[in-house]
Each structure stands twice: as C-alpha cells, then as structure tokens.
Image: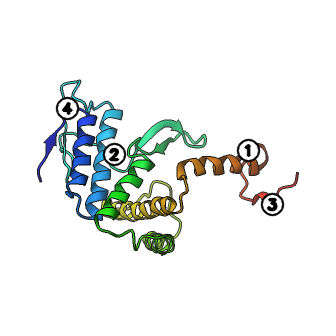
Amino acid sequence: MRHFRFKNRRDFFTCLQAAVRSRCLLNKTLLLQTIKTIESFNMMATNGKDACGQNGDDPSVSLNGGNDTSHSSAVNGKKAPSRNGGTGEERFSFSPQPTMEDIRRLQAEFTDERDWNQFHQPRNLLLALVGEVGEVSELFQWRGEVAEGLPGWTDSEREHLAHELSDVMIYLVELAEKCRVDLPRAVLRKMALNREKYPASKVHGSAKKYTEYED
C-alpha cells in the first residue's frame, strides 16, 4: 500500500479531491475507507498528535484508506470530556470531520461518475436504506440486550457494524439530498420541537409518549 506525506490537512484534502476527480476511488468500500482516513487524520490533530507536523511529527496518510502505524488513533470516533448522564463515564463523540455536507458531496461524486442517478431516486433510495437497516438489525439478532459500548464484541464484529451503519448513513444523506431536505438544519428544527414536546422538568426519567403526560 502506497503512503503519502502531507504538510497539513489542507494539502491532504486537496489531494483527496484530486483522487476523487481522477476516479481513484473506484468503489463504495474504498470511499468508506477514505472517509475513515479523514476521521483518523482529524482525530490525530484533535488528540494532540499534531497532524500538521508542528511538533516534529509528520504522519503518513494513505489515500487507500489506511494511516501509518506509527500514529495509532481510533477510527470510529473518540471520547469527549463531557459526562454521560451523570454516570461519571466519558460520553462518546464523533470526529469533527467529515461533515454531513462532505459525505453528501462524496456520495454525489461517486454516483455521478457511474451514471447511477437514474437509479438513485427517492423510492429506490428509501428501499435501499430500509435494506441496510435490516442488515444492521441482523448483527444484533439473538444477542439479547446489548450494553452501551458493545462489550464482548470482537474487532471484526465492530468493524462489520461500522460498515453497515455507514451504508445507512450514506443512503439517508443521499435520500435527503434527492428530496431537497437540508438535513442538518432539519435535525436542529426537529430537536427544538422535541424539547417542546418533552420538557426535562416533566419527563425526566420516564419513557412515556408526550401524549401521555398531563398538563
């Protein structure tokens, strides 16, 4: 696997865009690997492993989806200092990159290059999304209750789950694009409505539906 060294993140993303335009990203698996590479690259910067080489380190990042083993970092996100519901445990958080718009753009380029827009229409995307959710469900089938953090899951099982959840995310974002729904803004509006439906002072510790609460 060939590795390339970059002076900073800007150079990395410029090279990545060139790879997309030149059709170096030839399949969905490689696209997902590239997204994971971006996550790893940004996490190294976030966690103080200076990805820009300011501390004398010059990490290698591969356009084939890997990163130099001399700089290990989590692929599926990181832990933030915020506390999880007062339990004292650190709450999990996503990497800051890629953004939802980055994912939309990468998938749009992937679809355009293959002339698949004729197939990637709302109904088909919805059915594909439901199918991918079913594949996620299969990974949890017959396991009973699964605790947060997936204790007991192997690395292979976790990676399989990451792939299936990524498929769900990709189809969801593309469906929103084709329906002309600005998903990030729509999410913020919906969360504001949820706060009105479920005021913390009224629903704290309860799983009732909002219609079951008395005024």
Closer to the chain start, of discs 2 and 4, is 4
* For residue 141, side relative to residue 199 (left or right): left
Res 39 label:
2
Q: Which amino acid does the dot numbered 3 rest on?
A: Thr
- Of badges 1 and 3, nearer the viewer stands 3
Closer to the chain start, of discs 2 and 3, is 2
- Identify the residue at horizontal 69%, vertical 51% (top origin): 194
- Identify the residue at horizontal 77%, vertical 57% (top origin): 210
* For residue 71, side relative to residue 93 (left or right): left
- Of badges 3 and 4, nearer the viewer stands 4
Q: Considering the image in quadrants, where does the N terminus appear?
A: bottom left
- Which residue is the site of mark 3? 211
Circle 4 sits in a helix, a strand or a loop, which is it? loop
Kindly indicate whether the residue at mark 4 contacts the one at mark 1 (C-beta within 8 angstroms).
no
Circle 1 sits in a helix, a strand or a loop, which is it? helix
Give the farthest residue toward the top. Answer: 55
Relative to the observer, which residue lies in front, 204 or 56? Answer: 56
Res 7 label:
4
The answer to whether residue 87 is visible is yes
Q: How far apart are marks 2 and 3 (CA)?
A: 40 Å
Circle 2 sits in a helix, a strand or a loop, which is it? helix
Q: How far apart are marks 1 and 4 (CA)?
A: 47 Å
Res 61 label:
none
Picture quarter containing residue 26? bottom left
- Of badges 2 and 1, nearer the viewer stands 2
Give coordinates of residue 68: x percent, y percent.
Answer: 18, 44
Give coordinates of residue 25: x percent, y percent.
Answer: 23, 58
